[in-house]
Image: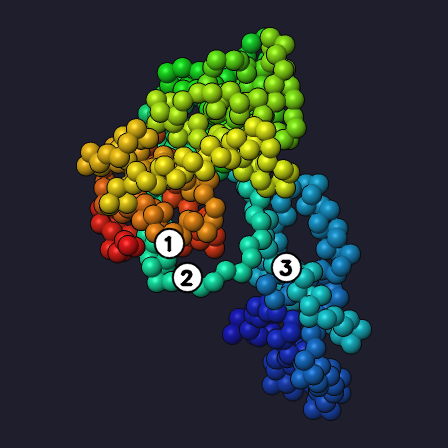
Amino acid sequence: MSGTFGFRKCEATPSRFKRPGLLQVRALRPLIRARIITPFFILALILPLATESFAFFLKEAAGEDVVSNSPDEPTPGLGLIKTSAALARSQSEREDSGPVVLESTKKRTVSSRRRNTTDVKRKKSASAAALNPRKPEKIASRVELAPPTPPAAVTPKASRPALSQRQRQLRDSIDATLSLYARRVENVGNRNCWEIMHWLIGYGIEAKVSVRGRSANAIGWLCQNGRCKGTQLFHLSGARLQARVGVGVQGHHGQFLAMLAQSKVKQEYPIVVSGRKFTLADLIAFEQGNCRLGEELTFKLIAFSHYLPLDAKWQNRQGQKWDIPRLIQEELKQPVVGAACGGTHRLMGISYAARKRQASGQPLEGQWKRAEKYIDDFQIYALRLQNRDGSFSTDWFKGRADSGDAARKLQTTGHIAEWLTYSLPEEELHGPQMTKAIGFLASLMRKHARKKWEIGPQGHAIRALRLYRERAFPEPASLHPQEELAGPSSTKQPR
C-alpha cells in the first residue's frame, strides 16, 4: 500500500482495456473501514459508475472501438490519441519544426473524468490509417557516388512452350555462371577506364564498382568522369564535351557510346565533366562530328543504329554529310579478318543496323539489304568453323582451329557467341550448335572460376551468356548464391 489514502498507484493503460470507475471504488475503501461513508451513500455513488461500465462492455462485445475524444487519453501503440484535426496540426508542425517526439503514457496521470464514448464512433480502418504509430527517423546525409542508371524497358513476352530437361539444364548452368562472376568486385583504383568499360559490358546497367570501399554504379561513375586508376574518360574543349581515345581510355572512337547503347541507357542520362552538366545526347553529337572516311566506324554504327532514327542525317566537323546507310557502306568496304577482336565488333555493328531496319517493318533495300546478306553469310561461315567441344575457332574467322588454351577459347568463343546470339533468329538459338556453344562457354567459366581472366574477354563472354539468357529464356533469372566459387559444373552439357 502506498500513496494518499493507501490505494495503489495505477499505471496508464490503453483506454479500451480500462474498467471505468474501478479506481474510484478502491479509493473509498479506507473511508468505508472508518465508517465515514454509509452503505446507502456507496450505493448511490456506484450506481452511475456501474451503468457506465455496463455500456462499455456492451460496446466492446459489439466489436466497436471505444476511443476517447480527449487529447489527454492514451491509446494503443501511441503516447497520445489525436483527432483528425489534431493529426493534421501535428503533421504541419512536424514539417515546420522537425521531428516530433511522442509522449510516453507512463508520464501521464489518469484522468478521472470520462466523456460519453457513444458520441465518438470511428471505423477501425480509419483509426488504423490515421494513427499509424511510426516515429519519424533522422536520415543521415548520403553522398551518391553515381546516379542510378535508368533500367531498360521491359516488353511483354508471349506465352512459350515448356522447356525440355536439356533446356532447363542449360538455363541453370548459365544462371549459376552469371551468379559466380557477379560476386566479383572491380576497384576503380586498380582498373583504368578501358577495363571498367569491359566490366560493365557484361552486366550493363547492373554493373557495380568499388570506389574507396563504397559501391557505385559503373556506368554512373564513368559518366561522372570519375577517375579510374588515375585516368578520366572525358575532357572539355572550350565548352564542348569530348571523349578520349588511347591507352587506358577508349580503344576506338565511339566505343563507350556503343557500350551504353548495348546497355540501353537513355539519351537523357547525365554526364558531368569539370562541374559542367551534359547528357548522353551531347556525347552522341560529339561522335557524329567525328565521323571520318577511312577510319574505323564500327562502334559509331552500333551506337547510331540504337540511338538515331533510321533516316537521320548529319554533318561532321568538316562539313561532310553522313547517314546510317553511308556508315554501313563504309563498314562493308573494310575487311572482317584482321579487324578488332577478329572482326566480331564490325559484324556486330552491321547486325545492329540490319536488325533495327527489320524491326521497323521498312523494306530492306540498298545498303540495308547488303548488310542483311553479309550477316547471313558470315553466320553460316562461323558455325561451320565450330569445334567438336562446342567452342568456336581459336583463329577467329581465318579457319577452323583449336589451340586447347582456355584463355584463348574464352576470348574467341565469347566474342563470336555474343555476336551470333544477338544476330541469329530466335528459333536458331535453341539449335544444337548454339546450345552446345553456350553450354561450353558456361562450363568453361565455371570450371575456371578462380582463374583471373583478362577483363576484356571475360566481359564479352559474360555478355554472351546474358544475351542468350534474355533471348532464349526470357523469364526472370534464378541465380544460385550457394554455388561454390571453385566448384566445377555439376550440370551436364547438352549434346
* Count of numbered circles in the view: 3
Colouring used for the render: rainbow
Q: Quadrant of the C terminus?
A: bottom left
Earlier residue among tags 2 and 1 = 2
Q: Residue at x 45, y 38 (%)?
A: 376
**Are the residues at dot 2 and dot 1 in contact (C-beta closer than 8 Å)?**
yes
Q: Percent position (x, y) of residue 248?
A: 37, 18
Q: Residue at x 42, y 49 (%)?
A: 429
State how far apart marks 2 and 3 are (Cα).
47 Å
Q: Residue at the right extreme? A: 119
Q: What residue sits right under mark 1 in the picture?
A: 171
Q: Is residue 227 above or below residue 113?
A: above
**Are the residues at dot 1 and dot 3 in contact (C-beta closer than 8 Å)?**
no
Q: What residue sits right under mark 2 in the picture?
A: 163
Closest to the observer, 55 or 184: 184
Closest to the observer, 205 or 492: 492
Q: Amino acid at mark 2?
A: Leu
Q: Is residue 135 above or below residue 273?
A: below
Q: Amino acid at mark 3?
A: Asn
SS category of the residue bearing label 1: helix
